[in-house]
Image (cartoon, rainbow, N blue to C red):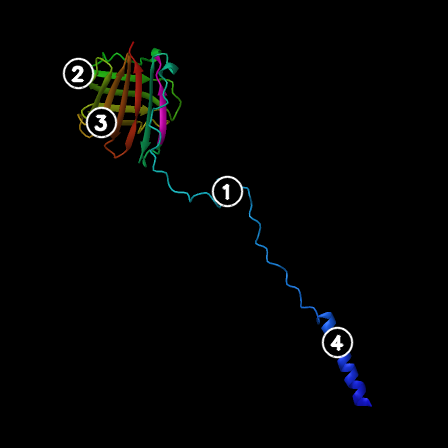
Amino acid sequence: MTLIRRAGLLMSAALFVACTGGPAAPSTPAFSPPPVSSVAPSAGTPSEAPPATPSAAPSAVPGASLDPSLSDAGIVARVTISNDSRRGRDGTHDIIGLDADGSECSGAFEEPGYTVVAWYDDAPIGLIHRFGISVAAAEIPETDGSVTDIADGSVSFDFVSERGLDTGYTGDVGRENEGSSTIDVTRAGTSLVFDFVGVTNEGVNFAGQFICVEG
């Protein structure tokens, strides 16, 4: 009797499973890829910016922003000094010439040479009070144009100093122990532009520009 009852229970269980389909399998969520932003990343974000590299572009040309109209004599100059370990004047220095102090753009001082000079007699300590350039008069263009690579000219300038020592810088191959310089002269109407590079006898390098308007 017991066996008949167990057999009936087993048949009932089988019928239940067949009707219900058995126990449900565990559900697995469907995979969804991460959303893609429709906004393009900014070109200026750090992740997109290219790695920094030293610029190979040359620095601004010394004197490129000089304005002779700032001077009542029409004369301005700028020089950049480097390797000046003894006097410590590395950097860029300007002078605006004053007519009353004798600034001159006529070149009449030392014919057959042609000398231009900017003077600022009351320049404060640490500034240039005199800046002069000399070339042969024949090197000055009579009409608009340029004469380049003048190697026998002279560039010289002086600072105001508390002690009054070590104030002068000269590049003049025509004078013994006075360094050297190379000068380009460009005329545009009555304006003369002197671009120069030089080195003093002590090995101080300088480069710059002198602009003057002939009176």
Query: Which amino acid, by three-letter code, is at mark 4?
Result: Leu
Location of mark 3 (residue): 182
Q: Secondary structure at mark 2?
A: helix
Location of mark 2 (residue): 138
Residue stretch rendered in magenta on the structure: 91-98
Query: Which amino acid, by three-letter code, is at mark 2?
Result: Ala
Dot 3 surroundings within 10 Å: few (below 14), some, or many (20 or more)? many
Q: Earlier in the sequence, mark 2 or mark 4?
A: 4
User: For the residues marked 2 and 1, what is the alpha-carbon distance in whole angstroms?
Assistant: 59 Å
Query: Which amino acid, by three-letter code, is at mark 3?
Result: Thr
User: For the residues marked 1 and 4, what is the alpha-carbon distance in whole angstroms?
Assistant: 67 Å
Location of mark 4 (residue): 15
Query: Which amino acid, by three-letter code, is at mark 1?
Result: Thr
Kindly report the secondary structure that dominates the magenta region of the rendered protein.
strand
Query: Looking at the image, is 35 positioned above or below residue 75?
Result: below
Across and down, in percent, residue 181 comes to 23, 27
Please give the name of the residue rendered at 78% of the width and 85% of the height, measured from the top-left corner: 6
Q: Earlier in the sequence, mark 2 or mark 3?
A: 2
Across and down, in percent, residue 187 comes to 26, 16
Q: Nearer the viewer, residue 140 or 28?
A: 28
Residue 45 is marked as: 1
Asked whether, in this view, residue 213 is left or right of residue 2, the answer is: left
Between disc 4 and disc 3, the foreground one is 4
